[in-house]
C-alpha cells in the first residue's frame, strides 16, 4: 500500500527522535510563555522550560488531565488568542462543566493530513467512494473524513445518521467502496442487510474504516465476513484530535501513531511510572506541533501498549495495540463517549433525585448498544403518586439527553445501598 | 509536503547554550539544515541570531552539552578548521577588507583552498559571471564600493572558498530597497546552484519568502518553526514582527 508522506512516515527512527527533540523545545517554550495553565504549573513545581532538554526530560513535567482542561475553561489552556483560532470544539457538549478545544488553520491542515495518511495506508485512492456514516452532529471529527478524502481525491457520500435501509440504498446507488462509521453502526447496517436478504456482493464495498468505540477482534471478523470487506481501526483522542492520532495499516499489526506530531508514552495508571515497550498501560500523549491547544503529557485514559519494531508496511512510526479498555469510568455507547461524572453532574442539578445511581448497559456483539440509568429518588416522590414520578423520570431523561446527546432510558427507583459503581461491566453483573 | 522533505541533514545542532559573561543568550537551541535548503533564522534584535552563527563558526564558545554536527562533531574546532570543512560565514559588518582591491579580497577568500592559479582563475571567473559589477571594479579598493557592491563582494569572497554551507548574517542590512531585492535574488540563485544557506535576517518578510524553512528565535529560544509560507500566515509571527500584541485571549 502506498505511504502518503514517506519522507516522514518511513524515516529513520533516530532521525525521527531528532525531529521530536527539535519540536519538543518549541512546544515547551510555547506552552510556558503562552499557556497560563502551564506557566502556573511550571512555576509551582519549580520547573523551568530550560530543564527540558530532551524527550527524556519530559518525565519531569507533571501530567495533564481532563480535569485540568475543565478547570481551565474557557481560555486557560489556549496558547493563542481566539482571533488565531478558526475552529472551536466542545467534545463533552456545552452543558455543565464543558471543555473547549481550539484549532488554528495550521492545526486543521495537519489534522487533515493525518487522516489522509490513514486512508492512503489502507488503500483508499482517488477512485474510491467513501460513505461516511458517522453522526456529523455529535461526532465532531466526522467532517475531517471529508477533508482528508478531498486531499486524496476520493469522493465522499456523507450519509451521516440515515437509517440502515437508506445507507444500503445509497451504497448501491453510488457504489460506495468504503464504509466509514462506528463499528456498532456497521453491525446494525449488516443486520439490516441480512434481514432483507441482500447479497453483500450486490454492494461494491471493499474497505471499512471504523473507530470511536472499542471493537474486539470477533466483531471485526463478523463485519469482514458479512460485508466481504477488510476492516481497519482508526484512533483519536477527543481532547487532541479525533480521529487521526493513529491508524492501522494494511499489515494490521497495531495502529501507527503519528509520532512526528505526537510523542507517546505508556504509564502505569496507578503509579504514573513510565512503562517500557510492550507493556500495557495508559497512553500519555504530548503534542509536538499543535498551535492553539498544546498539551504536555496528556493522560488519555486509554489502555494500550507500544511497539517500536519496524512494520512490514515500511512505516517506522511506533504502533499501539488496539484500545479495548479504559483506565477511567468512561463508557462508549454507540460511539458516543459517556462519562459517569457527567451523569452525576446532571443528576445533582435535579430536585428530588438522590445521590445514588446505577448504569446499565445493553451489549450487542460485545459493544454497548443502549444505556439505562437507574436513579434513586427521595422517598417523598413515591408517596405523592405516580404522576410526579413520571414527571421526574421525563425531566431526568431530557436533562441527560441534552447533556450527553444520547437517548437514555431512565428508571426511578429506590436503590438499596446505592454507590457509584466501578464500571459499566460490573454494574451489569450487580444490577 | 507538510514538513519539508526529509533529505540528507547537512548541519545538525543540539542543545546549544551560549553565554556573554553570566548572561545566557542561547538556551538549548536545537535545529537542523538539510542539504540544498535555504533555512532562515528570524527574530528581534538581541534574540541571539548572530551568536548562533558565531557558535557554529567556532567564534563563540558554547556549553559542554551542546552538540554541532557537520559530517562530524565540529564543536570545539578552531574556526579555520570549520571553514576548511565548508562552513562559511558572511558577517553582518566589516565583511570586506577596505584597503585591499576587489581582486585581492577575492583572492583572500580562496586562501584556505591553497589551489593553483588556473583553478583560482576559474573560481574567480564564476564569481565575475555572477557579479559583473565586481569585474568592472576589480582594481578598485573595496572601500570605494557602495553598500550593495560591498555585499556582493562579501558574497563573492565567500564563494571563492567553495562553501557547502553559506551562513549569511543580515545581508540586507543598511541597503536601499531595490538593492535588497537584488541581494535576495542572488541568495536564491546561489541556492539554485546547490549551495545550502543558513540566513539570519531581521527583514522577516523577505526572508520567509525565499526560505524553505524558518526558525523563529526569541530571547535565545526557538519558539516556532515551519515553512516560509506557513510562517508568513502565522499570527504569532505577525505579532512578533509587527508588534501587534494582545492583552487577553478573548481579544479580537
Image (spheres, coloured by chain):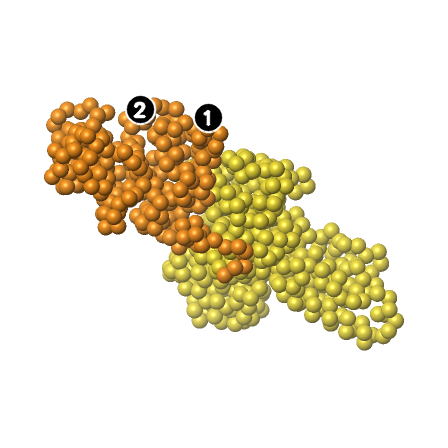
Chain colours: A yellow, B orange
Of the residues under marks 1 and 2, which one precedes in the sequence? Answer: 1
The chain to which mark 1 is attached is: B
Are discs 1 and 2 less than 8 Å apart at CB?
no
Q: In which quarter of the image is the C terminus of chain A?
A: bottom right
Disc 1 from disc 2: Cα separation: 19 Å
Question: Residue at (54%, 70%) from the top-left corner?
Answer: A162
Above or below, comparing residue A24 to residue A376 in the picture: above
Name the residue tied to disc 2.
B81
How crowded is the residue under tag 2: few (<14 C-alpha within 10 Å), some, or many (20+)? some
Position of residue A370 measured from the top left corner of the image (x, y, whole percent): 67, 63
The verdict on a common chain for dots 1 and 2 is yes
Outermost residue toward the right in this view: A383
Image quarter for residue A297? top right
Question: Residue at (26%, 43%) from the top-left corner?
Answer: B187
Q: What element carries label 1?
A: loop
Question: Residue at (65%, 51%) from the top-left corner?
Answer: A67
Q: Foreground residue, B188 or B92?
A: B92
Position of residue A96 measured from the top left corner of the image (x, y, whole percent): 67, 62
Task: Give the mark count.
Answer: 2
Q: Is residue A183 visible?
A: no
Name the residue tied to disc 1.
B64
Question: Residue at (34%, 30%) from the top-left corner?
Answer: B57
Position of residue A30 measured from the top left corner of the image (x, y, whole percent): 50, 46
Q: Would residue B81 appear left or right of A209 to someone viewing this image?
A: left
Amino acid at each position: 500500500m502506498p505511504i502518503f508522506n514517506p519522507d516522514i512516515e518511513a524515516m529513520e527512527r533516530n532521525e525521527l527522535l531528532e525531529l521530536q527533540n527539535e519540536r519538543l523545545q518549541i512546544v515547551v517554550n510555547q506552552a510556558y510563555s503562552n499557556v497560563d495553565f502551564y506557566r502556573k504549573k511550571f512555576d509551582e513545581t519549580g520547573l523551568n522550560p530550560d530543564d527540558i532538554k530532551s524527550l527524556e526530560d519530559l518525565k519531569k513535567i507533571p501530567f495533564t488531565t481532563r480535569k485540568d482542561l475543565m478547570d481551565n475553561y474557557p481560555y486557560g489552556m489556549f496558547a493563542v488568542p481566539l482571533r488565531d483560532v478558526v475552529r472551536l470544539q466542545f467534545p463533552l457538549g456545552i452543558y455543565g462543566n464543558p471543555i473547549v478545544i481550539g484549532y488554528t488553520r495550521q492545526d486543521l491542515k495537519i489534522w487533515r493530513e493525518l487522516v489522509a495518511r490513514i486512508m492512503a495506508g489502507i488503500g483508499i485512492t482517488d477512485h474510491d467512494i467513501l460513505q461516511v456514516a458517522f453522526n456529523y452532529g455529535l461526532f465532531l471529527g466526522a467532517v475531517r473524513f471529508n477533508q482528508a478524502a478531498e486531499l486524496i481525491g476520493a469522493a465522499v457520500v456523507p450519509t451521516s445518521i440515515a437509517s440502515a435501509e437508506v445507507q444500503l440504498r445509497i451504497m448501491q446507488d453510488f457504489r460506495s467502496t468504503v464504509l466509514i462509521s462506528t463499528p456498532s453502526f456497521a453491525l446494525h447496517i449488516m443486520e439490516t442487510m441480512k434481514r432483507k436478504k441482500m447479497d453483500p456482493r450486490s454492494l461494491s464495498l471493499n474497505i471499512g474504516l471504523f473507530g470511536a468505540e472499542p471493537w474486539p477482534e470477533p466483531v471485526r471478523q463478523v463485519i469482514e465476513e458479512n460485508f466481504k470487506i477488510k476492516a481497519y481501526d482508526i484512533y483519536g483522542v477527543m481532547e487532541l484530535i479525533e480521529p487521526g492520532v493513529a491508524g492501522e495499516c494494511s499489515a494490521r499489526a497495531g495502529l501507527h501513531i503519528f509520532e512526528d506530531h505526537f510523542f507517546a508514552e505508556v504509564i502505569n495508571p496507578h503509579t504514573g511510572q513510565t512503562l517500557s515497550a510492550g507493556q500495557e498501560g495508559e497512553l500519555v500523549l504530548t503534542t509536538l506541533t499543535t498551535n492553539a491547544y498544546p498539551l504536555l503529557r496528556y493522560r488519555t485514559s486509554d489502555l494500550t501498549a507500544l511497539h517500536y519494531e519496524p512494520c512490514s508496511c515500511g512505516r517506522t512510526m511506533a504502533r499501539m495495540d488496539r484500545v479495548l479498555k479504559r483506565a477511567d469510568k468512561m463508557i462508549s455507547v454507540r460511539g458516543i463517549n459517556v462519562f459517569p461524572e457527567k451523569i452525576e453532574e446532571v443528576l445533582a442539578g435535579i430536585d428530588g433525585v438522590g445521590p445514588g445511581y446505577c448504569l446499565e448497559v445493553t451489549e450487542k456483539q460485545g459493544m454497548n448498544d443502549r444505556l439505562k440509568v437507574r436513579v434513586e429518588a427521595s422517598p417523598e416522590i413515591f408517596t405523592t403518586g405516580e404522576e410526579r414520578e413520571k414527571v421526574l423520570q421525563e425531566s431526568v431523561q431530557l436533562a441527560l439527553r441534552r447533556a450527553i446527546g444520547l437517548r437514555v432510558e431512565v428508571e426511578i427507583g429506590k436503590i438499596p445501598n446505592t454507590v457509584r459503581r466501578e464500571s459499566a461491566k460490573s454494574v451489569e453483573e450487580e444490577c | 509536503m507538510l514538513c519539508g522533505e526529509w533529505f540528507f541533514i547537512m548541519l545538525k545542532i543540539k542543545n546549544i547554550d551560549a553565554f556573554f559573561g553570566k548572561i545566557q543568550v542561547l538556551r538549548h537551541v536545537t535545529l537542523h539544515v538539510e542539504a540544498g535548503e535555504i533555512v532562515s533564522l528570524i527574530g528581534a534584535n538581541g534574540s541571539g541570531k548572530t551568536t548562533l552563527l558565531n557558535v557554529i563558526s567556532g567564534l563563540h564558545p558554547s556549553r559542554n552539552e551542546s552538540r554541532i554536527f557537520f559530517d562530524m562533531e565540529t564543536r570545539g574546532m578552531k574556526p579555520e578548521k570549520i571553514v576548511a570543512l565548508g562552513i562559511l560565514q558572511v558577517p553582518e559588518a566589516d565583511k570586506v577588507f577596505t584597503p585591499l582591491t576587489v581582486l585581492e579580497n577575492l583572492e583572500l577568500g580562496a586562501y584556505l583552498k591553497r589551489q593553483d592559479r588556473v583553478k583560482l582563475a576559474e573560481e574567480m571567473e564564476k564569481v565575475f559571471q555572477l557579479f559583473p559589477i565586481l569585474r568592472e571594479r576589480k582594481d578598485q579598493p573595496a572601500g570605494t564600493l557602495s553598500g550593495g557592491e560591498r555585499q556582493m563582494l562579501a558574497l563573492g569572497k565567500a564563494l571563492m572558498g567553495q562553501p557547502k554551507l553559506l551562513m549569511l548574517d543580515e545581508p540586507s542590512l543598511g541597503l536601499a530597497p531595490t538593492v535588497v531585492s537584488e541581494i535576495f535574488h542572488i541568495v536564491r540563485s546561489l541556492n539554485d546552484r546547490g549551495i545550502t544557506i543558513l540566513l539570519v535576517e531581521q527583514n522577516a518578510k523577505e526572508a520567509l519568502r525565499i526560505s524553505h524553512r524558518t526558525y523563529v528565535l526569541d530571547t535565545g529560544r526557538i519558539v516556532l518553526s515551519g515553512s516560509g509560507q506557513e510562517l508568513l500566515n502565522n499570527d504569532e509571527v505577525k505579532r512578533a514582527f509587527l508588534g501587534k500584541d494582545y492583552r487577553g485571549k478573548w481579544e479580537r
